[in-house]
Image (tube, rainbow, N blue to C red):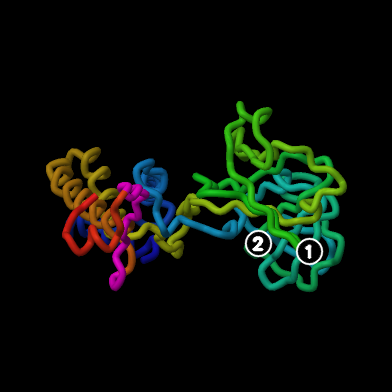
Amino acid sequence: MNVTQLFSQINAAYRGSDDDVPAASSTDWTLWLATANRKLAEWATDDKNNWMSSFQVNSPVEAGTVSTTGTTTLTGSSTYFTDYNVGDTILVSGETVRTIGTITSDTVLTVTVAFSNTASAKTFTHAAIIKTGVQSYSVHRSLYLPSDYVTVTSSNNIAKFMIGKPQERDRFVDEVYLSGRNPQTLTFYDDIESTSNLVGGTLKIVGYYLPTELTSDTDLIVVDDPYWLVYATASELAFNDITYSDKAPDLNAKANSLYSGMVSINRRGTSNYPRIARTNVKRIVGTSFESTTNSGSTL
């Protein structure tokens, strides 16, 4: 489902046949888009549910788009180049990996080897490369919640770091911590020495990433159940519209029902092998697994 289809469904649920779907960039269209984006953000940041669909082993594409002209210059639109460091790598769609040589601003940088193509509005990814003496690295702006650990991968080594608290940075070793906002910064507890195996390695943060905001008619809806977004958006629009406010409770009830379904699916395993929670109950002294199983006893 894309934004055009989303708005068509919202219109049917909210206004029925009373009115047409708002035209792109109209006042109502902008209001509907802002409401849908707010609901999408509420879904993504629900602190009671870590959505499997938001989980990423590798960082997603970066914000904005870039243009190349067959030279070493990379020009961005709505990008954040100053989050990066010289020596980091960039992978532009349709190109091979390039190393950053200079960073002029959030929208202009150069690479060490010229790009092969002349192209515009391209997506791209970025990788932070560990450097001697550099303790802190900006993380992807859409990172919402790290999952379990941070890795630094080089050609002959993979190092894992648990994520600790900033205030405990003097108590532990071999850990990292997150701090700040827009962007968040990841900092290593230990100094990065020139002899460290980490130098030259690629930083990777496994975790849950926020979806990109919807901006155009062709953008795809990434929420687990797009019809939840239909009813959630429609219910808020109806609540604030005196003409349709009586529909708001029913629309909200439908949205809540679909949300419960998303939660249920997110928490279970596969259809053939439902998730079974493992326990760490110690065996009672003097018993064995066989004897307790055969006798029907439980621990």
Highlighted magenta segment, given as a residue range: 271-285
Q: Which mark is residue 98?
A: 1
Is 101 positioned to the left or the right of 274 in the image? right
Instruction: Residue 296: say if magenta.
Output: no
Quadrant housing residue 71:
bottom right
Residue wearing tag 2: 124
Residue 222, position in %: x, y? Answer: 41, 60
Instruction: Residue 278: say if magenta.
Output: yes
Q: Which mark is residue 205?
A: none
* Residue type of the residue flagged with mark 2: Phe
* Residue type of the residue flagged with mark 1: Arg
Residue 23 at least partly seen: yes
In percent of the image, x 16 and y 41: which residue is there?
A: 245
Residue furthest front in the image = 286
Q: Is residue 233 above or below residue 70?
A: above
Who is closer to the viewer here, 142 or 220?
Answer: 142
